[in-house]
Amino acid sequence: MTSRATTSKRAVSPRVARLLRARVSDGSLLCFDLDGPLLDVSERYWRVHVSAAGLDVAASHGRARYLALKRRGATDEEICRRLRIQVAASEYSARRRALLEQAEYLAFDRVWKWTGRVLTILHQAYRIAIVTKRQNAQTYRVQLLATGLRRLVDAEACEADVEGHAGDKGALIRRAERLREGSSARRRHGARHPDCSQHGTDRDRSELRPARPTPVVASPSGRVIG
């Protein structure tokens, strides 16, 4: 089962607040990618790889080597060649894409131990959004609720929300900003906070790197500024 984010009641210290304000201009939106910065997805990627390659996970070896290749940015073709996968690279890629966002594999994701604390502290001073290239809006938003991440941010958007803008992180940021502004307006008028059902219907290497989350900083117009 996917782990949940733990929050922190610790306030932002004056020194940290000064550092944050020096980095982020007034009215900016802090945008975090989901897979990698906020979630440890290494086990999901390994399980999907094993299934796509037609292997038995219980008898499979080479997890560390596979993850090292993914973190280095190796293509599916290179992975199949180096790991001697007995499946055509095109077939392997198609299987992998079909499985990557299925709920049974998303259940292997884990929230990094620092995720909740970092988001909670930043949220005391700034507006926060999650933007991701996930293409299955349903499983993505179910996971946000299950992990507790949705309540820690003001807005979120996935690639399924911006049809015709595949791979355009700027479009995702603009979408998140519009959703945040709409949510703020509804709260001012006493409306219920929207849940996932009301939203409508670098990558591999960064998603597998266990580094502390680094926000993308965007202006209200959606332009990345840092």
Image (tube, rainbow, N blue to C red):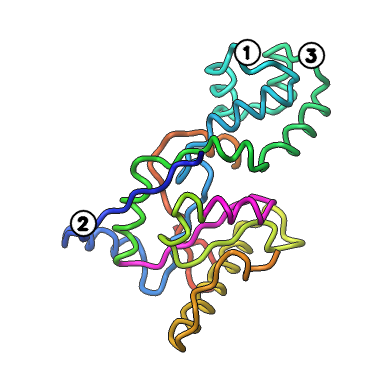
Q: Which disc number belongs to residue 10?
A: 2
Q: Which disc number belongs to residue 78?
A: none
Q: Is 158 or 81 nearer to us in this picture?
A: 158
Tell me which numbered mark, 1 or 2, is placed earlier along the sequence: 2
Q: Are marks 1 and 3 in contact (CB under 8 Å)?
A: no
Which residue is denoted by mark 1 in the rendering?
60
Q: Crowding near pointer 1: few (<14 within 10 Å), some, many (20+)?
A: few
Question: Which residue is painted at 77% across and 61% down in the image?
Answer: 164
Q: What whole-number distance in Å separates the C-alpha atoms at marks 1 and 3? A: 13 Å
Please provide percent x and percent y for residue 191.
Answer: 49, 83
Question: Which stretch did the figure color magenta?
Answer: 125-144
Q: What secondary structure is marked by label 3?
A: loop
Q: Crowding near pointer 2: few (<14 within 10 Å), some, many (20+)?
A: few
Tell me which numbered mark, 1 or 3, is placed earlier along the sequence: 1
Amino acid, disc 2? Arg
Question: Which residue is painted at 54% across and 66% down in the image?
Answer: 223
Q: What secondary structure is marked by label 2?
A: loop
Name the side, left or right, on which 215 lies relative to 144. left
Q: What whole-number distance in Å separates the C-alpha atoms at marks 2 and 3? A: 52 Å
The residue positioned farthest toward the front in the image shown: 1
Amino acid, disc 1? Ser
Amino acid, disc 3? Gln
- Location of residue 190 with respect to 58 vertically, above or below: below
Q: What secondary structure is marked by label 1?
A: loop
Which residue is denoted by mark 3 in the rendering?
86
Question: Which residue is painted at 54% across and 35% down in the image?
Answer: 108
Quadrant hosting residue 85: top right
Question: Which residue is painted at 62% across and 27% down in the image?
Answer: 47
Q: Is 122 or 188 nearer to us in this picture?
A: 188
Please provide percent x and percent y for residue 19.
Answer: 25, 58
